[in-house]
Structures are given as C-alpha cells and as structure tokens.
Image (cartoon, rainbow, N blue to C red):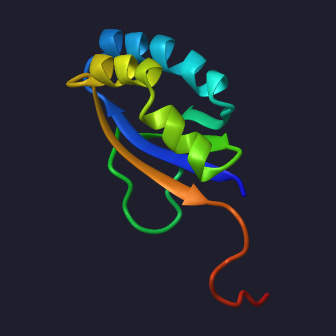
Amino acid sequence: MSVYVIVDAVNLDEERALEYRVLAEPTIELYGGRYRIQGATPEPVEGVWPEGRVMTMVEFPDMARARRWYFSDEYEKAKRARDGAIDVRLLFVEGGKAAWPVTA
C-alpha cells in the first residue's frame, strides 16, 4: 500500500534550504519515492494556514520503504543540512480506503 510523506515547511534560510533540496531529492528517488506535490503554497479553504508555509508530498511504495528512506545515511545528510534552515512538520500517511464510511 502506498505511503505518503506529507511535509509542512517554512524556509528560514533560502540558501541553506536550497542545499537541503539538492541533497534530499536524489535520496527520494533512490528509495523509490516520487514527488506528488513539491514546495506548493496551499490555498486555504477551511481553517487558517500560516503565511509562508509550503507543502510537499512524496509517495513511496510502502511504509517500509518510506522508513528506510527517512532513516537512511543518505537522507541523514540532508536532514543535517536543513537544521535551522527549514522549520518542518512531517507525517507518514498510508493510502487506501477511509477508515469510516464516506457517502456522497
């Protein structure tokens, strides 16, 4: 089952954020991930979305692969590069059917 890595971020230092992206992107591909959304500014429909935040979503084939990527030596270098450069909130979410009945 596909797993989505959902990232909510704000760049604190643009130059160092670019360094992070250069290091992170090849690791995602290396572990079978594909960008679905990359650095998009969300358009709030309900609730409040803090200004300056961007959204990224990466799809991995399964939870095991997403975890291997996140805890890999390759991605660890990217995480160190983003420290203090990007404020990040990150989730792993399994795709598939909703856990509750959905009606139209």
Q: Residue at x 49, y 57 (%)?
A: 44
Query: What residue is drawn where x is 46% and y is 43%?
Result: 7
Name above or below for residue 96 compared with residue 33: below
Q: Does residue 52 show up?
A: yes
Residue 5 position in % (x across, y down):
54, 46
Q: Is residue 41 visible?
A: no
Vertical relation: 13 (above or below) 47: above
| Residue 60, x across and y down, in percent | 66, 42
Q: Quadrant of residue 54?
A: top left
Hey, which residue is sitting farthest left in the picture? Answer: 84
Q: Position of residue 83 (x, y in %)?
A: 24, 25
Q: Nearer the viewer, residue 101 or 53?
A: 101
Q: Of all residues shown, which one is farthest toward the right?
A: 104
Q: Which quadrant is home to the C terminus?
A: bottom right
Q: Which sits in the foreground, 41 or 77? A: 77
Task: Check the image and report above or below for 7 versus 76.
Answer: below
